[in-house]
């Protein structure tokens, strides 16, 4: 009997030894992968608002709770990620992932907090030294532009941590196939919920487990609690592993924890649960060990998920919080219940030893007996044969259910471990990575969030975006006396830098940032141009003025206000929001000082996005559709009509465009007194549909030969569209993107026309119109200006950089 | 009656519960010690519920004192600015007169920084490793506030200002 008892206890002792080992492993295994990418539960939320323009096959994602960015590129062309000084940092493409060893980002981005040393030969200006790091088409890196790097809270957050804050906006540029893909997003502080319900859940779980010891089904209930503890811990680990990016071994390692702690402790806990269900009372100590270990680790590492808004887990936030509460509560309960189970059910041999101890011998203790019910139950249990091995037989058929229950639970736990591991191994890395839970700030709608790329071959704001924005502010400047070449270059550099930031919705760091605080970039574009009068100033010889910039001739009938015409420099600011446009124009105007001062400025407006169908032609204040016959980007000769392609043009202008600005006052009182038919004959189009009077629909080409019943031309001889049509102007065409304006009693059109050369665009057309247009009775040209917009700018350069030739100075 | 097992068992149970108390105390004591050793950093920089015990920025950051660059005999204004692991520039605001200004950035921490100078024709320091320093000389003629953000830590608010008066 004695031998057999020892033999049956051997596994128990073995288990105890393993429990001790597991406890010994605790210090080394404290980081039980409760952090992913170096980040645990947090109130900081990094959001990617947009990657624009969107390219199918190129996807960027914020992963690991904001710790890293992940770029996938399945296109045939590589994507280059720019580093902190706009230098190429990484390229991801068909031939794998390469890092530029000359980029400081290669070293900084390896660590969540950039605690590293950048080698002296890492110079962003140096030619890239590419090194292949992987064959995959995905790269993940700690981009320090997207997360909080400081070991203290932001000042505003520290002042009011229970309120939501926009900490900052971020911006990362990618290059793909000659285009700049601009990723923008925000870093927010999102306060978490109250932890009280989870404290209560943990406390109630612990109390239930302790109470279970004093019930008739103590063993089964303790076994169940241990099984549930392991199951909750497995679920928690699986939630973490699913958001861990990386290869299968990395994800398996995240699942089992550092040092594969889970691989040891979960099967061990489940085995103990099964044996406890079989009344192996001694294993109450194992339950104590496993419970204490998991509970304390979970409490230390994961309690913050209760009060923080997001956590690195694939589970829904509240399920994750409940899981943590269960592990902490059940574990703490088992820490107490294990020894209590032993005390209550220990075998007689041990009991004899125990009764020798002073406490049990003290009569006072006996008199302070616990409630009779507990005592009676304990007595019944004690009356049973005391040895462990006798218990199953004694319990007989009645305990089969309990054992079955615990066994099922244990088997379920093993299944959960295996299933979780398989799911993690098979899961696609990165895809389930969006950490659930946080209440993100209200997302901006498409209007506010839309960004137009600033960098590129051509300046934005000419033919991009396709639909003109709702707001215009145009500012003309005169150069201050004595400004030299360096002064002008400095001004252009400041404008370029600020325009690049503003158009991507980034703050400038001045007090004006507050004007647009919380606003998106709203399709802001900034377009810079040079007037004819600039040549002859700032060290630019008059002879350097390109032929395209020949000043406009005087036209009959115009009543120009000289103080509100012309200018050395032009800033054209467009946006879908008036505040955004104003803020940008004002910031850039301030940056112009002291090299340039405002000569005149105009505000214009158009239909807001969403008000009319996207493709609809805009209407002017006379009620006409304006811009029907514009060149279309799909036209074969669009580029040559709108952009300067002449090889004889100076390099700075090639790829640019020439803008004619006319402020045309509409004499609306006279106009509105006309009957509709008279108005339509003046223009040559129907007002409602925009169809030419010769018939058809808006875009039907006008037939100038069509006659009415009485033999008169359907489109009168002095109709506006007859005189303006390219067919009668040697093909002269321009891209008109006009805006309406009001100025006190005055109202009218800010006529903006883009062309390769006004001498083959605006000038011949306006000469014909000025001479005979029926519309002349109702309009008055009051402002005129001409500006040449240089070609676009690449990162690191500035607009008009080659204005002084190729000399980089 | 007193000699029957039914009577002894309750007493045993009572004694065992009393004996469990020292164990309980030991266990909770161990937990308390662990928590205490972790100190205020227990829940990291974001702190406990409602950010209690969170790491808050020092008051100096809230009200940055401006320090003027010192004019040397050679007409160059000089100032040393330290940059550190707290992502601060000290002084955060440098004031100077228009003219030639020599800015020395000394990294007193371990984290690298790269301070950009948002001034006309201004470049920046390039990477400054921990314990390294870099000197940049600029010529500014126009009064104004010129930002000096760290290219690595801009999102985290690491930004100084060069105030030309």
Image (cartoon, rainbow, N blue to C red):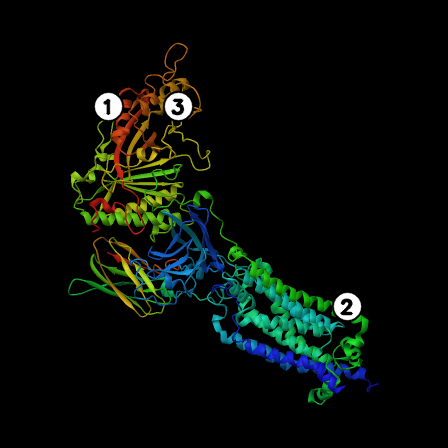
Q: Provide the chain ID for the residue under circle 3.
A: A
Q: Residue at x 46, y 60 (%)?
A: A67
Cβ atoms under marks 1 and 2 closer than 8 Å: no
Q: Is residue A785 above or below residue A4?
A: above
The residue singled out by tag 2 in the image is: A401
Mark 2 to mark 3: distance in Å? 88 Å
The residue mark sitting in front, 1 or 2, is 2
Secondary structure found at label 2: helix
- Specify the quadrant of the image occupied by residue A635: top left
Q: Is residue A349 above or below residue A621?
A: below
Local packing at callout 2 (Cα closer than 10 Å; few below 14, some 14-19, many 20+) is few
The residue singled out by tag 3 in the image is: A701
Secondary structure found at label 3: loop
Percent position of residue A808, x then y: 22, 51
Q: Residue furthest top?
A: A710
Mark 3 to mark 1: distance in Å? 29 Å
Local packing at callout 1 (Cα closer than 10 Å; few below 14, some 14-19, many 20+) is few
Q: Provide the chain ID for the residue under circle 1.
A: A
Percent position of residue A102, x then y: 32, 61
Secondary structure found at label 1: loop
Q: Provide the chain ID for the residue under circle 2.
A: A
The residue singled out by tag 1 in the image is: A556
Mark 1 to mark 2: distance in Å? 105 Å
Q: Residue at x 58, y 57 (%)?
A: A316
Q: Are marks 1 and 2 on the same chain?
A: yes
Q: Is residue A226 visible?
A: yes
Percent position of residue B103, x then y: 25, 63
Q: Determine whether, in the image, residue B27 is placed left or right of residue A572.
A: right
Foreground of the two, A94 or A777? A94
């Amino acid at each position: 009997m004695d031998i057999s008892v020892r033999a049956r206890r051997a596994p128990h002792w073995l288990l105890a030894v393993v429990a001790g080992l597991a406890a010994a492993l605790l210090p080394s295994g404290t980081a039980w992968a409760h952090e992913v990418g170096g980040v645990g539960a947090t109130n900081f939320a990094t959001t990617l608002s947009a990657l624009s323009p969107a390219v199918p096959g190129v996807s960027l994602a914020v992963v690991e709770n904001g710790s890293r960015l992940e770029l996938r590129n399945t296109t045939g062309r590589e994507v280059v990620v720019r580093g902190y000084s706009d230098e190429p940092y990484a390229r991801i493409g068909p031939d794998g992932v390469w890092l530029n060893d000359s980029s400081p980002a290669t070293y900084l981005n390896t660590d969540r907090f950039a605690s590293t040393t950048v080698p002296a030969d890492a110079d962003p200006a140096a030619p890239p030294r590419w090194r292949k790091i992987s064959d995959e088409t995905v790269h993940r890196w700690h981009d320090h532009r997207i997360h909080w790097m400081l070991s203290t809270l932001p000042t505003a957050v520290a002042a009011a941590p229970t309120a939501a804050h926009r900490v900052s906006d971020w911006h990362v540029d990618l290059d793909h196939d000659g285009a700049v893909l601009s990723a923008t997003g925000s870093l927010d502080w999102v306060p978490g919920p109250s932890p009280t319900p989870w404290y209560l859940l943990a406390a109630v779980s612990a109390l239930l487990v302790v109470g279970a010891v004093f019930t008739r089904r103590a063993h089964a209930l303790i076994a169940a609690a241990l099984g549930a503890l392991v199951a909750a811990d497995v679920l928690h680990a699986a939630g973490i592993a699913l958001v861990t990016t990386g290869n299968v071994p990395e994800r398996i390692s995240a699942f089992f924890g550092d040092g594969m702690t889970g691989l040891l402790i979960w099967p061990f806990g489940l085995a103990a649960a099964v044996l406890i269900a079989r009344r192996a009372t001694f294993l109450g100590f194992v339950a104590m060990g496993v419970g204490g270990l998991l509970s304390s680790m979970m409490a230390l590492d994961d309690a913050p998920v209760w009060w923080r808004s997001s956590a690195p887990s694939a589970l829904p936030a509240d399920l994750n919080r409940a899981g943590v509460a269960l592990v902490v509560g059940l574990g703490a309960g088992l820490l107490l219940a294990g020894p209590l189970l032993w005390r209550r059910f220990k075998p007689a041999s041990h009991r004899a030893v125990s009764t020798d101890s002073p406490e049990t011998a003290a009569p006072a203790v006996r008199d302070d007996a616990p409630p009779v019910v507990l005592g009676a139950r304990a007595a019944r249990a004690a009356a049973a044969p005391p040895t462990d091995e006798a218990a199953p037989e004694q319990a007989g058929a009645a305990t089969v259910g309990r054992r079955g229950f615990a066994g099922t639970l244990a088997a379920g736990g093993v299944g959960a471990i295996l299933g979780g591991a398989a799911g993690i191994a098979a899961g696609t890395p990165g895809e389930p990575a969006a950490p659930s839970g946080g209440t993100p700030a209200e997302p901006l709608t498409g209007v506010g969030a839309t960004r137009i790329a600033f960098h590129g071959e051509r300046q934005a704001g000419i033919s991009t975006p396709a639909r003109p924005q709702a707001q215009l502010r145009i500012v003309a400047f005169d150069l201050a006396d004595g400004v030299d070449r360096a002064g002008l270059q400095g001004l252009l550099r400041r404008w370029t830098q600020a325009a690049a930031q503003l158009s991507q919705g980034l703050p400038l760091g001045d007090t004006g940032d507050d004007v647009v605080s919380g606003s998106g970039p709203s399709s802001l574009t900034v377009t810079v141009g040079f007037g004819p009068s600039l040549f002859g100033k700032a060290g630019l010889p008059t002879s350097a003025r390109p032929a395209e910039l020949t000043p406009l001739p005087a036209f009959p009938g115009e009543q120009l206000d000289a103080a509100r015409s012309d200018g050395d420099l032009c800033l054209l600011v467009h946006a879908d929001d008036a505040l955004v446009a104003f803020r940008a124009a004002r910031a850039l105007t301030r940056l112009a000082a002291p090299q340039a001062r405002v000569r005149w400025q105009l505000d214009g407006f158009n239909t807001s996005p969403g008000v009319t169908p996207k493709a609809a032609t805009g209407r002017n204040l006379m009620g006409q559709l304006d811009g029907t016959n514009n060149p279309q980007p799909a036209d074969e000769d669009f580029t040559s009509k709108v952009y300067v392609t002449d090889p004889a043009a100076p390099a700075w202008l090639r790829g640019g465009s020439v803008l004619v600005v006319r402020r045309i006052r509409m004499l609306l009182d006279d106009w509105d007194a006309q009957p509709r038919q008279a108005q339509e004959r003046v223009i040559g189009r129907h007002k409602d549909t925009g169809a030419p009077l010769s018939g058809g629909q808006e875009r039907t080409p006008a037939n100038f030969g069509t006659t009415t019943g009485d033999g008169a031309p359907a489109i009168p001889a002095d109709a506006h569209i007859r005189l303006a049509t390219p067919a009668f102007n040697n093909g002269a065409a321009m891209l008109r993107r006009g805006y309406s304006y009001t100025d006190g009693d005055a109202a009218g059109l800010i006529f903006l026309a883009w062309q390769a050369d006004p001498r083959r665009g605006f000038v011949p057309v306006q000469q014909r119109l000025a001479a005979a247009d029926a519309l002349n009775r109702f309009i008055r040209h009051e402002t005129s200006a001409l500006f040449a917009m240089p070609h676009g700018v690449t990162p690191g350069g500035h607009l008009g950089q080659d204005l002084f030739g190729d000399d980089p100075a | 009656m007193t000699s029957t097992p039914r009577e002894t068992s309750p007493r045993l149970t009572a004694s065992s519960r009393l004996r469990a108390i020292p164990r309980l105390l030991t266990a909770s004591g161990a937990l308390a010690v662990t928590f205490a050793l972790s100190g205020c950093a227990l829940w990291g920089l974001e702190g406990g519920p409602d950010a209690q015990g969170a790491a808050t920025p020092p008051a100096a950051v809230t009200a940055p004192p401006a320090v003027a660059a010192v004019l040397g005999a050679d007409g160059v204004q000089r100032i040393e600015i330290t940059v550190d692991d707290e992502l601060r520039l000290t002084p955060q605001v440098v004031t100077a007169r228009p003219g030639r200004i020599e800015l020395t950035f000394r990294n007193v921490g371990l984290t690298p920084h790269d301070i950009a100078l948002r001034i006309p024709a201004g470049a920046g320091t390039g990477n400054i490793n921990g314990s390294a320093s870099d000197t940049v000389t600029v010529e500014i003629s126009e009064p104004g506030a010129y930002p000096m953000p760290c290219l690595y830590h801009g999102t985290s608010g690491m930004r100084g200002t060069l105030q030309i008066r």
